[in-house]
Amino acid sequence: MQIVMQENDFIVSKTDIKGHITYGNETFIKMSGYPEKELLNAPHNILRHKDMPSVVFKLLWKRVQNKQSINAYVKNQCKNGDYYWVFANVTPSFDARGNIIGYYSVRRKPNDRAIQTIEVIYADLLKAEKQGGVNASEQLLEDILKKQGVSYDELIINFQK
């Protein structure tokens, strides 16, 4: 069953450099369905839904490890099997010397129209991934962006408008 975020909800979490959860706000804990003690120190992918193509996370990790932020639509799975969609912004956190010490993510309610479109794209990316691996999925994403004449960031932001 789908859980829908409220317009004013913000899900906030922090992870260490390996992607293990070090902080989650009350909304994050509530939406996930996990008790806080099960979330803390768990890998963030504990929430990964099977409908999420690996290429999205490959791009996310590439960006944040290169000290860049990224926006993405993510379908998360709750502990009980329910799911929810988010519009996520993931940003690296730095120490005083500019070294990455973790990642900070703020998620909000995605545009409903965006989800209808992104579900189709993600299904195609997953199909390509199952047939030819992550590289095939990545090539399909590049083809979609080229056909649309936009960058990944432009595509994602335009969906949220």
Image (cartoon, rainbow, N blue to C red):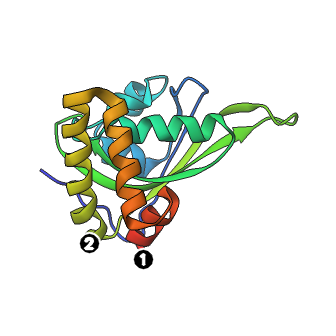
**Label 2 Cα crowd, 10 Å radius (few <14 / some 14-19 / many 20+):** few
Q: Determine the residue located farthest toward the right in the rendered image.
A: 97
Residue positioned 61% across, 49% down in the render:
69
Q: Is residue 160 above or below residue 13?
A: below
Return the x and y of residue 66 as percentages of the image width and height. 67, 37
Return the x and y of residue 138 as percentages of the image width and height. 38, 39
Residue at mark 1 to residue at mark 2: CA–CA distance: 10 Å
Taking depth in this image into account, of 113 and 44 the one nearest to the observer is 113
What amino acid type should be assigned to the residue bearing mark 1? Answer: Lys
Labels in figure, total: 2
Q: Determine the residue located farthest toward the left in the rendered image.
A: 1
* Label placed on residue 107: none
Q: Secondary structure at mark 2?
A: helix
Q: Quadrant of the C terminus?
A: bottom left
Mark 2 lies on residue = 113
Who comes first in sequence, dot 1 or dot 2?
A: 2
Mark 1 lies on residue = 161
Q: Is residue 112 above or below residue 19?
A: below
Taking depth in this image into account, of 74 and 124 the one nearest to the observer is 124
Q: Is residue 143 left or right of residue 13?
A: left
Return the x and y of residue 136 as percentages of the image width and height. 31, 35
Return the x and y of residue 91 as percentages of the image width and height. 61, 47
Residue positioned 55% across, 23% down in the render:
18
Residue positioned 25% across, 64% down in the render:
117
Q: Is residue 54 left or right of residue 43?
A: left
Q: Is residue 106 left or right of residue 84?
A: right
